[in-house]
Amino acid sequence: MAVIRGDEELRNCAAVVADELSQDFYSADAKARFSGILATLQWVAGEVVPSPIDQRPGVTPSSQAVEDELANAYDVIYRRRPPSKVVNGSYAGGVEATLLWALGRSDEPPTPLD
């Protein structure tokens, strides 16, 4: 299954998350989650950024690549894979929430949009 959210929805969500990241009152875990959300939104929107979990450059968000990243996020969340400098459990949780929303498996965006 491919991403079903439109470019405008992805951009609007990315703008909200970028604004949240600019705030100074969030904890390190919250900022990691927002970073995971933003990285995933940029990746699924087709921007040339590394894949959010594997951090591989040039990976096109095909259906298989998206499913792989979701599986990799679960591996970090459930500690089947060690965290890295960039990817910890909070970051992976942001990736998971974003991919589920982008794929239409969740109606809830990864962060409130209002």
Image (tube, rainbow, N blue to C red):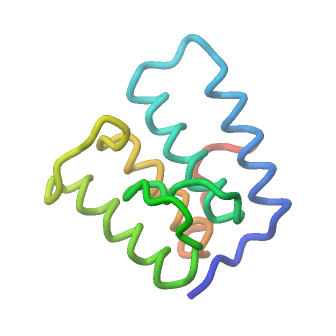
In this rendering, the count of numbered labels is 0
In the figure, residue 29 lies in which quadrant?
A: top left
Q: Position of residue 62 (x, y in %)?
A: 57, 81
Q: Residue furthest front?
A: 58
Position above or below: 81 against 20: below
**Placement of the C terminus among the 4 image quadrants:** top right
Relative to residue 72, is residue 22 drawn left or right? right
Farthest residue to the right: give it: 8
The residue positioned farthest toward the top in the image shown: 24
What residue is at 37 percent from the left and 58 percent from the top?
54
Q: On the picture, is 51 further left or further right than 71? A: right
Give coordinates of residue 64: x percent, y percent: 47, 84
Q: Is residue 93 left or right of residue 66?
A: left
Q: Position of residue 59 (x, y in %)?
A: 53, 69
Q: Position of residue 84 (x, y in %)?
A: 26, 41
Quarter of the image where the N terminus is located = bottom right
Q: Is residue 82 left or right of residue 62?
A: left
Q: Quadrant of residue 23?
A: top right
Q: Name the residue rendered at 52%, 38% in the picture.
A: 35
Q: Quadrant of residue 18?
A: top right
70 relative to 22, above or below = below
Q: Nearer the viewer, residue 41 or 30?
A: 41
What residue is shown at x 19% (from left), y 56% (from top)? 78
